[in-house]
Amino acid sequence: QLPLVESGGGLVQAGGSLTLSCTASGRLYSSYIMGWFRQRPREEREFVAAVRWGTGGTTYADSVKGRFTISRDRSENTQTLQMTDLKPEDTAVYYCTGGSTWPPQNHWGQGTQVTVSS
């Protein structure tokens, strides 16, 4: 197991911004991928974004491209999701995830609520 601890989230008005962070306890190899999934009410979990630990390469869901930015700080074992121009449909529980294969779903954080009011 690789504990993932999230922080951030909360309530924001539409058009606003929030930042989520996730810190991993333990050594992360270059092949590791960290990402975010979200689950809207009454819906399945869906992929949001991911970053490759070694190269820093990123992947985004179409619904968040241009609005969300994922990055990682290898010295802090932390990845960050900067969310801008938030929309009510971004309201969901956001989960930090990680894994050595795609999609990164071997390890999960506890989830953090993001609520965007219209």
Image (spheres, grey):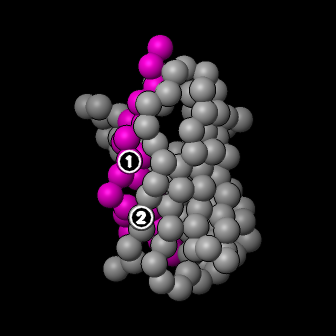
Q: At label 1, which amino acid type do we have?
A: Thr
Q: At label 2, which amino acid type do we have?
A: Val
In the image: residue 99, left or right of residue 75: left
- Look at the image and tell me whether residue 46 can be seen: no
Q: Position of residue 77 (x, y in %)?
A: 58, 74
Q: Crowding near pointer 2: few (<14 within 10 Å), some, many (20+)?
A: some
**Residue drawn where x is 44% and y is 19% of the image:** 117
Can you tell which quarter of the image residue 52 is in? Answer: bottom right
Q: Determine whether 17 is above or below 111 in the image.
A: above
Q: Determine whether 63 is above or below 22 in the image.
A: above
Q: Position of residue 28 (x, y in %)?
A: 55, 81
Does the magenta portion include 50?
no
- Look at the image and tell me whether residue 32 can be seen: yes
Does the magenta portion include 98?
yes
Distance of mark 1 from mark 2, alpha carbons? 10 Å
Q: How many marks?
A: 2
What SS does tag 2 mark? strand
Furthest residue in direction top, as rendered? 118
**Residue drawn where x is 44% and y is 58% of the image:** 6
Whether pointer 1 and pointer 2 mark residues with C-beta atoms closer than 8 Å, the reply is no
Q: Which mark is residue 112?
A: 1
Magenta-tinted stretch: 91-118
Q: Which mark is residue 5?
A: 2
Q: Position of residue 65 (x, y in %)?
A: 66, 37
